[in-house]
Image (cartoon, rainbow, N blue to C red):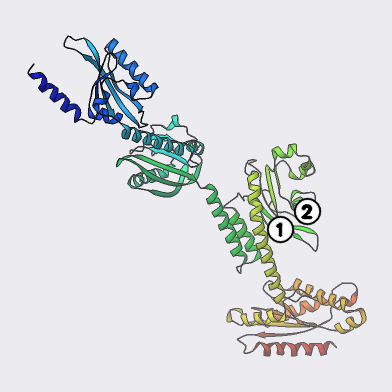
Amino acid sequence: MKAIPHEQYLLHALMNNISDSIYFKDKKNRFVMVNKAKAENSGVTPEDMIGRTDFDFFPREIAKKSFADDNRIIKTGRPVIDKVEEIIHLNKIRHWVSVTKVPWYDEGGKIIGTIGITRGITERKEAEEALLKSQQEFASLFKSSPEALVYTDEKSNILDINPRFTELFGYNLNEVKGRNLDNGMIHPPEKMEEGKWITEKALKGKLYYETIRKKKDGTLFPVYISGSRVMLDGKLQGVITMYKDITERKRNEELNKVLYNISKAANSPISLNQLYKTIHQELSTIIDTTNFYIALVDGKENKIFFPFNIDDTKPIHLPRTINHNSLVAEVIRTGKSIFVNQEMIKGEKFMMEFKEWFGTLRKVWLGSPLKVEDRVIGAVVVQSYTNPKLYSEKDIGLLEFVSSQVATAIERKRTDEKIRYLSFHDALTGLYNRAYFEEELKRYNSPRYYPLSVIMIDINGLKVVNDTFGHDQGDKLLQHLASLLNSISRKGDVVARLGGDEFVILLPSTTAEQVHDFHERIKKTCEEDNIKPIYLRPSIALGCVTQKGEYQNAETLLKEVDKRMYQDKNITR
């Protein structure tokens, strides 16, 4: 009896100095004893709670559940341990608690009520809910990301992948979960060590890298990789790595590079034939050009000719009219691309007229018009004799896109060459003009070309032909002589029209004896010419000079040749 007050004092001291809510209830679920924390949570004093029930402090539904738990414990003796509940008091205070209830026994071991301990866990619950929300948001972002994501532990073992990863690489989660990301599953053999280096880099911090990766079917493709660590409470959980397919970007970069190089070549001093080679070489980096040709339109003759052709099976394409029954002519006539393979030719009616031309050897054919503004100047064509799947519908757009730049480049170079041609050639005869001849005369004034010979030719009676038959016939006489001189000249000789009825030929490395023979051959050719009408047969006077060493003045040299020509002219008269 003496010990009881002391024990009661200790019990009350413990109850009132603990943060958990502690209470005792009798068999009728009335509060018999409560501590300060319990009373404060209910918004009253401990004395106010004695003799009252949960219905006095909680909404009816919560009180009913508490009564049910208490009655079950009194009846069965089985406690309720750490039951998590959301509690709402009549004062509208809302919080989460962990409830433990046990039987209350008397000295004889008989259950006389219940003892309850309620611990506030609102902060923990809110933290758990925040974590769960964060996890759900993470999972949602991870799964719905438009880029391929893989989540690995610190040893690169795969924990999860998102649907885009499956779409990009071809593997589903069951196939890769638990496998090591760096074991070559998505790495080409030569990229294995690089893969390990990337993982080490990502484990140390953020990573950004471009490289090549491999799909499940073995297809290689360019990717952009970024990776970052996943940390929780300062501890490394793993790495999330993102893979972005940059095939299209790389293709556009290559395409822009091709277009730039073609444009650069068009503005360089190279010839038109060299430009064709550059176009072929550049296009080979973005499309197969094993069998490739360029067709251009000659507007004057209404014909299609083929200035560039790479084709082992058909190395020569003969010129044809624009109305020719062929695919390339159809592309040029319509100004529209045509794509044909074996499957299409069997089903497309419009192809029947081209079936014989297409033939059985060709497996696939793709042609695109070369347009400058709205004018079709030709076509560019690729084809295959072996692989019907070499080209597809997507290549039509690609070829059409580059054809525009190709057409512009060709037209620019053709214009440049035409201007250059006109600046160095005589418009009537097509021979070199006086300015070009004089430049060549200076260039050839070198010991490597000695002895250097010059022949000057003059037409006798051109004025008579002009006055009698008209200037158009006089022009024909000049053009005919130009043709004769070209036909008998050697490669390397420079044949030019100085003006009027005077022509000149520069003969490098030609002795006086050789130039005399050539002089006689020109005369004989003109004398034996059978052209009709006869007035177009050239009657000529010639003069020639052979320079064995360096001459002082080109004008003086030409005057000497001119003097000798007029001596011959007087003899001829």
Residue 67 or residue 572, whichever sits in front: 67
Residue 110 or residue 275, whichever sits in front: 110
Please name the residue shown 59% across and 64% down the image. Answer: 264
Q: Residue furthest right?
A: 468
Q: Is residue 11 left or right of residue 353?
A: left
Mark 2: few/some/many CA within 10 Å (<14, 14-19, 20+):
some
Give the x, y percent position of residue 363.
68, 42
Q: Which mark is residue 333?
A: 2
Element carrying mark 1:
strand
Give the x, y percent position of residue 131.
36, 36
Please name the residue shown 44% across and 29% down the image. Answer: 174
Cα distance, mark 1 to mark 2? Answer: 12 Å
Q: Can residue 394 be seen in the rendering of this structure?
A: yes
Corner quadrant of residue 572 = bottom right
Give the x, y percent position of residue 187.
43, 41
Query: Where does label 1 land, which residue?
Result: 371
Residue type of the residue flagged with mark 1: Lys
Residue type of the residue flagged with mark 2: Arg
Please name the residue shown 35% across and 32% down the image. Answer: 93
> Which quadrant would the C terminus be assigned to in this image?
bottom right
Residue 201 or residue 527, whichever sits in front: 201
Q: Residue furthest left?
A: 2
Q: Residue furthest front?
A: 48
